[in-house]
Amino acid sequence: MGQTTMTVSPGRSGRQDGAAEGPGPLAACQRMLVPLMLERVGELAMMMLVVPAEALREIREAGGRGDWRAAACLLLTHTRAGKVTGDDLVECLSEVWVRNDPPAGPHGVLSDDEWIELFNVTGFFVGPPTTPFSVADRVCLFRAAPRERARGMSWCTHENMARGFVPRHDRFGRYQIWRADVPKSAILAALYRPGDAPFDLPPGEYREVVVNSAGLPDTLAVVSSAP
């Protein structure tokens, strides 16, 4: 019988001796691209740190100049852009709200809807958290305002505190002290304002309570007319 001869064809490299191939074009591209990608990731990470810091600096500089209306506008802009978040947003929102007088309504720097947008981003919070304060299912709150502004966002935990918000002028109309039983679902935040507290109450028992006015009861009671 004749012998059968088997021929082994070389691979794509043309090598038959098993020697290791040199790097191909793909490997060369990878060696060039990976360092570039890592560098870009580092740049993006730095941008993520720098942009929020720059936004916070702008807000605080406006507040440092006493221009709290500008600070409120900057806070809204930067929050919408995702540049102010988390604890930074809670801290800035607390300060900007209490520094604007009034913060909301027809004479405020932002509309009620814009403030509610900011408070909805944070969710309910107590400021500062180091002074405990709890909210029951329904809270009896008080507000100083003329009749046309009775259904506003800023309320107080005590009648005497509400009286402290009565201005010494009548440009906004005749003020009255209003009372409402507000459901917990309508309360956006409870803020601590030491300068506005009645002297007969210990710290922590009085708060300015920010309310979504859409959740107020249909009828508000008049406690008294402000002097």
Image (spheres, grey):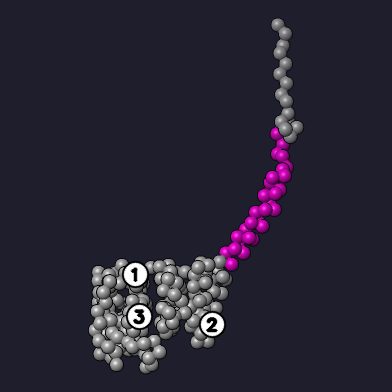
Q: Which residues are magenta?
A: 18-47
Which numbered dot is residue 148?
A: 3
Q: Count all numbered tags in the image, as a single digit.
A: 3
Of badges 2 and 3, nearer the viewer stands 3
Query: Which badge, 2 or 1, comes first in the chain's sequence?
Result: 2
Secondary element at image label 2: helix
Q: Nearer the viewer, residue 159 or 42?
A: 159
Q: Which residue is mark 1?
A: 214
Q: Is residue 172 visible in this depiction of the protein?
A: yes
Q: What's the residue type where badge 1 is placed? A: Ala
Secondary element at image label 1: helix
Residue 75: percent from left, percent from top: 49, 75
Residue 214: percent from left, percent from top: 34, 69
In the image, residue 8 above or below residue 48: above
Which residue: 50% across, 76% down?
73
Which residue: 37% across, 93% down?
168
